[in-house]
Amino acid sequence: MAMPREFYAALCLVLVIEGLVLFAAPNGWQSVMREASKMEPRTLRVCGAIAIGIGLLTLRLVH
């Protein structure tokens, strides 16, 4: 089963955005990662779930 082109385009945009953060603010990114490594896995999981929910809701609103 072939993946739609839009899916691949979305993955490419994720890479661009991630790369921009690393390129523009590497020290800030390292600081955030140090703080994240101190957090409980459950807290990180909840943050991830919230981010997914916000992303899906926003996608639904704009698409």
Image (cartoon, rainbow, N blue to C red):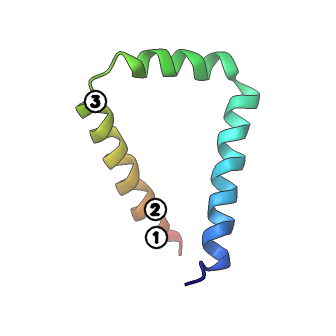
Residue wearing tag 2: 58
Foreground label between 3 and 2: 3
* CA gap, disc 1 and disc 2: 5 Å
Horizontal side of 35 relative to 21 (left or right) equals left
Identify the residue under disc 1. 61
Query: Considering depth in this image, is 53 or 19 the residue closer to the camera?
Result: 19
- Find residue 7 and report its horizontal and vertical position in percent: 60, 71
Secondary structure type for disc 1:
helix
**Element carrying mark 3:** helix
Residue ID for mark 3: 41
Taking the spot 66% from the left edge, 15% from the top edge, the residue there is 27
Which residue is painted at 73% across and 38% down in the image?
20
Residue 57 position in % (x across, y down)? 39, 63
Q: Is residue 26 above or below residue 63?
A: above
Image spot of residue 63 (x, y percent): 53, 75
Q: Is residue 45 above or below residue 32?
A: below
Label 3 is placed on what type of residue?
Pro
Is disc 2 placed on a helix, strand or loop? helix
Identified by mark 2, the residue type is Thr
Q: Nearer the viewer, mark 1 or mark 3?
A: 3
Q: Is residue 12 above or below residue 34?
A: below
In the displayed structure, does residue 53 sit left or right of residue 26? left
